């Protein structure tokens, strides 16, 4: 009876979906939709927000991911969430490119200040965001995924442990701590250049 309440791994859900179980797809969306919606808020700069709602971009992300699940190969635990993040980042970039080529649809209010930056860019600056992304790219997959899940998605250590198939929340805590130390060092080096 206890096994009926056990949470299925993402890898298991992906396998079940490929075997034709539509309920597995629904479980994947239910599990990751709120995470992706939270993460996506504030990623789209204000000049692009009138063209697409953040939730719309997340919906398109899921449609693209689900439509390509047959070709997706989860080579490691945590790969699916990384896959979703990559699709969403590409969606945001695509939307920004589109918004720059369209004429403005409203009159300009001279009292309104718009820096054109997302909430994240405003908080930390574009140079810091670039240094962070470059440092993430240097990390091994598991460390990068753990940082993204903790820092960007706000997942708890037990949630990350489950997602990465790690033995405990403490092992994830150490993994994230070591990875963040590396990222901070590389970002510091990048800023000195």
Image (spheres, rainbow, N blue to C red):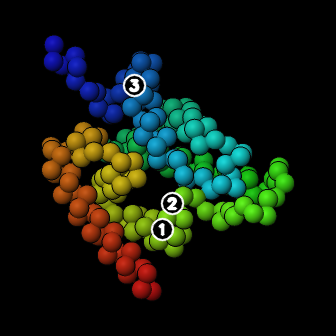
| Label of residue 124 in the image | 1
Cα separation between marks 2 and 1: 6 Å
Label 2: element kind: helix
| Label of residue 120 in the image | 2
Vertical placement of 96 versus 136: above or below?
above
Vertical placement of 57 versus 8: above or below?
below
Vertical placement of 145 versus 3: above or below?
below
Q: Determine contact: label 2, label 1, CB under 8 Å.
A: yes
Residue 50 position, x and y percent, is: 71, 46
Q: Earlier in the sequence, mark 3 or mark 1?
A: 3
Is residue 68 in view from this perspective?
Answer: no
Of the 4 image quadrants, the one containing the C terminus is bottom left
Is residue 30 in view from this perspective?
Answer: yes
Label 1: element kind: helix
| Label of residue 27 in the image | 3
Residue 87 position, x and y percent, is: 53, 46
């Amino acid at each position: 009876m206890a096994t009926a309440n056990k949470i299925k791994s993402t890898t298991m859900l992906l396998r079940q979906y490929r075997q034709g179980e539509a309920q597995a797809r629904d479980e994947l969306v239910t599990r990751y939709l709120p995470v992706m919606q939270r993460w996506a808020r504030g990623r789209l700069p204000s000049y692009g927000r009138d063209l697409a709602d953040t939730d719309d971009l997340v919906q398109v992300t899921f449609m693209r991911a689900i439509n390509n699940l047959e070709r997706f190969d989860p080579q490691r635990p945590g790969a699916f969430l990384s896959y979703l993040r990559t699709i969403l980042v590409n969606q945001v970039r695509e939307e920004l490119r589109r918004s720059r080529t369209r004429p403005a649809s409203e009159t300009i209010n001279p009292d309104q200040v718009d820096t054109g930056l997302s909430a994240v860019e405003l908080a930390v600056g574009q140079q810091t965001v670039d240094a962070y992304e470059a440092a993430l790219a240097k990390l091994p997959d598991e460390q990068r995924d753990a940082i993204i899940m903790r820092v960007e998605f706000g997942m708890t250590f037990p949630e990350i442990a489950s997602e990465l198939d790690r033995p405990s929340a403490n092992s994830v805590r150490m993994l994230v701590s070591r990875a963040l130390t590396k990222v901070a060092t590389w970002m510091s080096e990048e800023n000195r250049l």
